[in-house]
Every structure is written in structure tokens, then in C-alpha cells.
């Protein structure tokens, strides 16, 4: 896998939406990416709370359940029609913070105000990386 820098060409297209109680955070983001045909995007902002969650820890294997009301204090990562790779940090009622890889099962409690930026002229794909053993993100130009 080669390191290269790819620059977006043109203005960032912004998608703003509000998720409501009972919606799944990850599945909703994936649906928006499909509906809006986002080839490459980023989460710019996510503010809200969940009633329960599912996060994968740094082992890359173990998925942990969070059965508390939590504030979303951070959500970042890459999103597209093909794949979403998102990490989330949650603050519990006692103000302790937990975080990890966002999995299906993070259910919105009251609301989530979500802003996604779509990168013009850029696409995301995956390529096997012999060093990590995973299919890792690669950037592609959609304008060439």
C-alpha cells in the first residue's frame, strides 16, 4: 500500500440531519451515505445522546454493550456508500467516559444532531495491507 495525498476538488457538500429516538446511529449514517451517494465523507459534528450502545474495543474483536444513557461527546471517522469507519466517545451519567469503534446497536435516546461533509472528487476503497492484516482505507480520485 502506497502513501499518497489526495486533495478534494471543489466545495465540501454538507448534509445536516437530526436522528430521533429509537434510530440506530450507525445504520442511519450508512443509510444517509447510500441515499446521498457519498463516495467519501467525514463526520463533522454529532451531538446527542443514546439509551444503549455497542462498541468494539481496541482488540478488534470484543464488542461491549453499554446499557446506560450516555451523551455523545465525540464521533469521528470516514463514511461512504461502501464503508463507514467510526469511533465514538460517550459520557455516562457519572461523567466517566468510554469509547471505541461504533457498532450497530447504538440507539438514539432523545436526539442526535448530525453533520456529514462529502468530499468532492474523492472516493474511498479498501485494500489488503500485509502489515496490518486488515483491508485498509485507500483514497481514490473520481475526477481522473
Image (spheres, grey):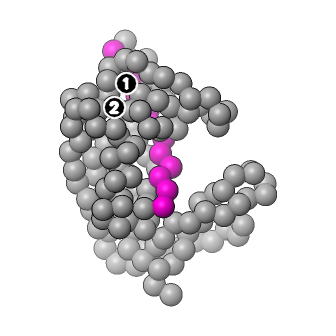
Q: Position of residue 144 (x, y in %)?
A: 50, 87
Please give the residue where the numbered disc 2 appears in the rendered image.
Answer: 107
Q: CA distance from mark 1 to mark 2?
A: 6 Å
Q: What residue range appears in magenta?
A: 82-93
Q: Position of residue 87 (x, y in %)?
A: 48, 41
Q: Foreground: 13 or 126? A: 126
The 10 Å Cα crowd at callout 1, few under 14, some 14 to 19, many 20 or more, is some
Query: Which residue is pictured at 67% across the width and 68% down the height?
Result: 3
Q: Are marks 1 and 2 in contact (CB under 8 Å)?
A: yes
Q: Is residue 92 magenta?
A: yes
Which mark identifies residue 128? none
Q: Position of residue 1 (x, y in %)?
A: 72, 66
Is residue 48 at all visible to an observer of this figure? no
Disc with the residue nearer the chain's start (1 vs 2): 1
Please give the residue where the numbered disc 1 appears in the rendered image.
Answer: 52
137 displayed left or right of 103: right
Work out whether 25 lies above or below 129: above
Residue reaching furthest to the bottom: 144
Q: Is residue 89 magenta?
A: yes
111 displayed left or right of 60: left
- Identify the secondary structure beneath mark 2: strand
- Identify the secondary structure beneath mark 1: strand
**Prevalent SS, magenta region:** strand
Query: Which residue is pictured at 78% across the width and 54% down the height?
Result: 131
Q: Position of residue 46 (x, y in %)?
A: 31, 42
Q: Foreground: 126 or 12? A: 126
Amino acid at each position: 500500500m502506497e502513501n499518497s495525498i489526495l486533495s478534494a476538488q471543489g466545495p465540501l457538500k454538507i448534509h445536516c440531519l437530526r436522528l430521533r429516538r429509537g434510530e440506530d446511529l450507525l445504520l442511519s449514517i450508512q443509510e444517509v451515505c447510500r441515499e446521498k451517494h457519498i463516495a467519501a465523507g467525514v463526520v463533522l459534528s454529532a451531538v446527542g445522546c443514546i439509551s444503549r450502545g455497542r462498541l468494539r474495543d481496541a482488540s478488534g474483536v470484543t464488542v461491549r454493550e453499554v446499557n446506560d444513557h450516555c451523551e455523545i461527546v465525540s464521533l469521528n471517522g470516514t463514511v461512504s456508500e461502501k464503508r463507514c469507519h467510526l469511533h465514538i466517545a460517550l459520557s455516562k451519567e457519572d461523567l466517566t467516559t468510554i469509547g471505541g469503534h461504533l457498532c450497530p446497536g447504538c440507539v438514539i435516546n432523545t436526539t442526535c444532531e448530525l453533520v456529514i461533509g462529502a468530499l468532492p472528487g474523492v472516493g474511498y476503497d479498501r485494500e489488503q495491507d500485509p502489515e496490518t492484516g486488515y483491508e485498509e482505507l485507500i483514497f481514490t480520485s473520481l475526477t481522473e
